[in-house]
């Protein structure tokens, strides 16, 4: 038995279960035992039946003296009724709707049961307990062999059809077999320094802890290890990248100044600083790998435009990728407006000397504002300075000759595969040698600082932490159900005054799929968009028929054809639509400065970061803008989070708050990053994160090839396959 033994070779795991495990990303024994519980059920409180009282959970051992199924009079429910006896007394036990249990238990068998005691007066009973059979038991003495009762019980993140009970049944014997054979890749001196549990003990304690304290200690060890490995991985990639070659783009200060002078506004200091950092990076003959973080509306595009200009002016090409057609087109327009008239030196290839800008999407292709076919575009590619586009940009046939800069907007929206593809394409950019283009990723997704530092480090991170001057604060209000009507009236007034509004539909919880699986992945996106179609139709009907029968309401959802979406967006921009009802998954990242109201139904179901993104759709002009957070559930439960939104306008602060209040489960894009769960959940622990980083730096400093750490080297190689970073 090895960690690498495939699950197919395990006797207890049939084909059905293999499939389900693979859905969780579990392919071998190692994956199983490193699939950690996310919480524990405390079934350790063993008492004798004589001491049974309401409450619990309690744990009882005893002999089955009676068992039968009873059908309730409405014939809907089956009750399985059992009586156990432990010589101090008899206890009634009840299960609901699990008639098959009668085949599991026979009179005279010993069992251990754990659960809560309910009932009234004398007729109390143990309700729906967890159970396991015992070969024997001694009164008041806990059986060491117990797995599902009588101890702290691990509860695992589950998918449908894969219960924690089944996982315990699989994990426990594996752990027993593998004991002391699991290679420990964490350097011993680090383990000693922080007094971590040894791996063999930690792995046992995280699954089957003797106490919550030990479970916590084990968890801390693994969290540290994951953060440490992640840091090592990222730092090492950075070292490798530093050895690669890229085109050095000499900074053309005059051109940049020319550009900024021509802008209708003054750049903020934060924009200037970010642009400077990027331009300085581009000067180096090493590939840049920079993340530009900035809140919605902070003006990232113009910063990217400066970088693009610099590169294009030097005679190299820029690829600029956006996640959706609408956004790609909008960027195409913005960049065309900003740079299209820009004069380069005329040359044989470029007689007019203009910056040549193109757009490639699944639907349309443009070059210098002329619509052309895909074929024509590909033929012209070598004469295009800046090519914007969707995923179409990374198709094989799109071959740049002199690509020196790749800009990726809202990169967290890209699937893992596309991103890898893009990076693969960063090689072979002509000039006879293997040059790698510089990469600028942009995001408005507020990533907690601990994460961005782990992934990028100080030197590769630019943050625009300042909004353009003159923006009015968006007035944000939580709207209780009873105040809905008045708010609708207010919106009517706004529209009478000539403004427009967005309405975001409530999110629908999809049935049967656990939330964990919904965070991020491509599949989840699919499911969500289907459900959202239903939500958006309902909302559309409600608003257009009942609430605003006199207004023009439009509808946008992810299942529409992109041409349809395009038309609706254009209509909205042209003010042919007053209120645009949209789902949460559809990209509304378009600029409609005339819109002044953002209405979010069921806002308590969204994460703060996402709500903040919605809010960023308004407040893009001089008009006073409003964000109304409708809540379905009256009361104070959600208000603590939502209130943070009222007082805080900064997306990054909100991300930190979300992390503190709800934990990392709601960070956007966790799955896309491919970061281990424990590492994610430890991000709130800034001290642990920085310790892990520092230790990683130290190890890399003294032994960059891991000559003294062969296990660590192997571990990181395995890591590479799982993680998907630039
Ligand atoms: P984001 O960072 O969300 O991508 P954009 O780049 O789309 O933001 O910018 C939002 C709007 O702000 C655009 O209309 C842009 O022209 C404008 N803008 C950008 N920088 C400034 C500035 N310094 N002053 C005023 N307006 C600006
Ligand atoms: Mg943007």
Image (cartoon, grey):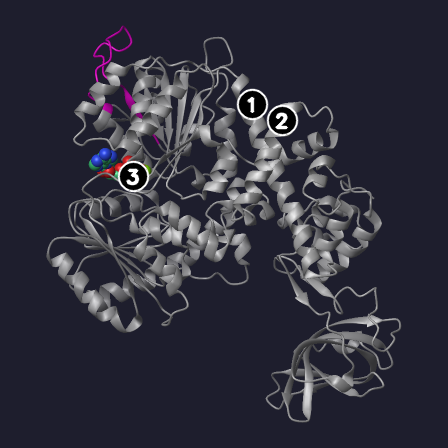
- Magenta region: which residues? 339-360
Of tags 1 and 3, the one toward the viewer is 3
In the rendered image, the quadrant that contains the N terminus is: top right
- Which image quadrant is residue 562 in? top left
Q: Residue 59, can we see it?
A: yes
Q: Which residue is mark 2?
A: 700
Q: Which residue is mark 1?
A: 239
Of the pair 328 and 58, the residue shown nearer to us:
58
Residue 366 lies, in percent from the top left, at: 28, 27
Neighbours of disc 3 within 10 Å: few (<14), some (14-19), many (20+): some
Neighbours of disc 2 within 10 Å: few (<14), some (14-19), many (20+): some
Q: Is residue 5 magenta?
A: no
Residue 223 lies, in percent from the top left, at: 62, 46
Secondary element at tag 2: helix
Dot 2 or dot 1: first in sequence order is: 1
Magenta span main SS: loop
Look at 31% across and 34% down and name the residue there. 300
Residue 178 lies, in percent from the top left, at: 82, 47
């Amino acid at each position: 038995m090895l960690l690498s033994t495939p699950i197919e070779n395990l006797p207890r795991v049939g084909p059905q279960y293999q499939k389900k495990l693979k859905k969780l990303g579990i392919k071998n024994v190692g994956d199983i035992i490193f699939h950690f519980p996310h919480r524990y059920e405390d079934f350790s409180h063993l008492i004798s039946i004589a001491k049974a009282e309401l409450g619990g959970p309690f744990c009882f051992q005893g002999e089955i003296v009676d068992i039968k199924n009873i059908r309730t009079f409405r014939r809907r429910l089956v009750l399985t009724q059992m009586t156990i006896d432990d010589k101090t007394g008899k206890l009634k036990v009840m299960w609901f709707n699990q008639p098959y249990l009668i085949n599991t238990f026979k009179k005279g068998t010993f069992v251990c049961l754990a659960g809560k005691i309910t009932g009234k007066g004398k007729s109390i009973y143990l309700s729906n307990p967890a159970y396991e059979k015992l070969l024997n038991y001694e009164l008041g003495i806990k059986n060491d062999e117990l797995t599902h009762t009588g101890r702290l019980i691990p509860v695992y993140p589950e998918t449908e059809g894969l219960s924690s009970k089944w996982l315990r049944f699989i994990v426990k014997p594996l752990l027993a077999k593998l004991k002391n054979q699991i290679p420990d890749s964490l350097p011993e001196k680090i383990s000693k320094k922080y007094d971590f549990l040894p791996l063999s003990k930690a792995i046992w304690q995280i699954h089957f802890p003797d106490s919550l304290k030990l479970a916590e200690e084990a968890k801390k060890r693994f969290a540290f290890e994951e953060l440490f490995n992640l840091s090592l991985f990222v730092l090492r990639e950075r070292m490798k990248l530093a050895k690669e070659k890229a085109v050095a783009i000499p900074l053309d200060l005059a051109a940049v100044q020319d550009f900024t002078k021509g802008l209708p506004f003054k750049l903020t200091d934060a924009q200037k600083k970010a642009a400077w950092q990027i331009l300085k990076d581009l000067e180096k003959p090493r590939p840049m790998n920079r993340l530009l973080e900035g809140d919605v509306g902070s003006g990232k595009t113009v910063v990217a435009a400066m970088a693009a200009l610099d590169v294009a002016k030097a005679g190299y090409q820029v690829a600029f990728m956006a996640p959706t057609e609408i956004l790609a087109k909008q960027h195409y327009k913005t960049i065309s407006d900003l740079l299209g008239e820009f004069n380069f030196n005329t040359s044989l290839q470029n007689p007019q000397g203009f910056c040549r800008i193109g757009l490639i999407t699944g639907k349309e292709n443009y070059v210098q504002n002329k619509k052309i076919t895909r074929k024509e575009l590909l033929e012209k590619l070598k004469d295009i300075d800046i090519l914007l586009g969707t995923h179409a940009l990374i198709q094989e046939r799109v071959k740049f000759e002199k690509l020196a800069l790749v800009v990726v907007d809202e990169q967290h929206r890209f699937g893992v595969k596309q991103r890898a593809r893009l990076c693969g394409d960063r090689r072979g950019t002509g000039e006879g040698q293997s040059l790698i283009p510089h990469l600028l990723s942009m995001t408005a997704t507020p990533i907690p600082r601990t994460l961005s530092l782990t992934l990028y480090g100080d030197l590769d991170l630019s943050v625009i932490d300042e909004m353009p001057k003159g923006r009015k604060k968006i007035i944000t209000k939580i709207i209780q159900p009873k105040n809905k009507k008045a708010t609708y009236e207010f919106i009517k007034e706004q529209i009478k005054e000539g403004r427009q509004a967005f309405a975001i539909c409530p999110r629908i919880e999809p049935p049967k799929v656990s939330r964990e699986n919904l965070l991020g992945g491509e599949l989840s996106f699919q499911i969500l968009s289907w459900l959202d179609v239903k939500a958006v139709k309902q909302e559309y009907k409600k608003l257009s028929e009942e609430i605003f029968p006199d207004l023009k309401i439009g509808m946008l959802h992810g299942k529409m054809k992109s041409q349809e979406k395009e038309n609706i967006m254009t209509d909205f921009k042209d003010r042919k639509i007053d209120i645009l009802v949209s789902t949460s998954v559809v990209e509304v990242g378009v600029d409609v400065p005339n819109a002044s109201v953002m209405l979010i139904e069921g806002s308590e179901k969204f994460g703060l970061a996402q709500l903040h993104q919605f809010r960023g759709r308004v407040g893009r002009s001089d008009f006073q803008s409003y964000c109304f957070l409708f809540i379905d559930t009256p009361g104070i439960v959600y208000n603590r989070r939502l209130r943070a939104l009222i007082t805080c306008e900064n997306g990054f602060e909100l991300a930190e708050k979300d992390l503190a209040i709800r934990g990392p489960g709601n960070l956007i894009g966790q799955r896309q990053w491919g970061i281990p769960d424990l590492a994610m959940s430890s991000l709130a622990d800034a001290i642990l994160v920085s310790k892990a980083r520092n230790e990683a730096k130290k190890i890399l400093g003294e032994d960059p090839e891991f000559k003294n750490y062969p296990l660590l080297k192997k571990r990181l190689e395995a890591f590479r396959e799982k993680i998907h970073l630039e």
